[in-house]
Image: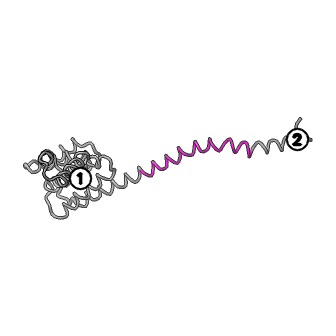
Amino acid sequence: MTGAFSVVLLAATVLVFPHRGAASGRLRELIAKAPLTQSFSSSKAEDDPLAAAAVFDLLAACLRSGMPISAAARAVAVAAGGPLEPPLRRAADLLALGADPVAAWERAAADARSDDLRTLARLIRRSARSGAALADAVAEVAQQCRAAVSDEATARAARAGTLIAGPLGLCFLPAFVCLGIVPVVIGLADRVLGGGLP
């Protein structure tokens, strides 16, 4: 972020002071060394729980468009980022080199750190063996990813409600005892003792 900001600042300096050769030379060096755009896909993919579902939806769309699985895996690997990129890229490379699809996806499943990618690799291996259509199965894996994220969010909300109820109960319990139970006990004691407490 600071690199892009410094490049913009140097570009503004060149526009304001066009005859300064050092600033324009430094700007050319920065442009040559680093691209102006920075890729945040890997950090977003690791932070976003729905990133895997989006990757699988993209793979299903590529397969529905008629792309071969190696080209689709390569295109999706470029867009995926994060932990899904290396196994997808490795499988695409192996398939492009002519490896057996079953062996290529077994390698991807072994390298995967994601259960969803292991499921995808299992489906692709099954499709390679049987010749079954793959796009609908990949879309179903994406739907399962979304359902798992939804279930996890619901479970977290339920846990949060349970954890909040404990401290609230501890806060309201003394007030309930002082305002609800103590006056009743004093009133009963007053009647039982028949004339008040000494």
Give the residue type at disc 2.
Val
> What residue appears at the point 45 percent right and 52 percent down from the top-left corner?
154
Give the residue type at disc 1.
Leu
Farthest residue toward the left?
Answer: 97
Q: Position of residue 160 (x, y in %)?
A: 50, 46
Q: Where is mark 1, residue-wise?
A: 123
Residue 90: tell me if it is visible. no
> What residue appears at the point 80 percent right and 42 percent down from the top-left corner?
185
From what the image shows, is residue 67 above or below residue 194?
below
Q: Is residue 26 left or right of residue 182?
A: left
Q: Magenta region: which residues?
A: 153-180
Q: Nearer the viewer, residue 107 or 83?
A: 83
Q: Where is mark 2, residue-wise?
A: 192
Q: Position of residue 169 (x, y in %)?
A: 61, 44
Q: Position of residue 183 (x, y in %)?
A: 79, 44
Q: Nearer the viewer, residue 60 or 20?
A: 20
| Residue 152 image label | none
User: Mostly what secondary structure, the magenta segment?
Assistant: helix
Q: Is residue 94 left or right of residue 182?
A: left
In reply to whether residue 176 is colored magenta, the answer given is yes
From what the image shows, is residue 133 above or below residue 154?
below
Which is more N-terminal, label 2 or label 1? 1
Q: Is residue 47 left or right of residue 198?
A: left
Q: Nearer the viewer, residue 41 or 170?
A: 41
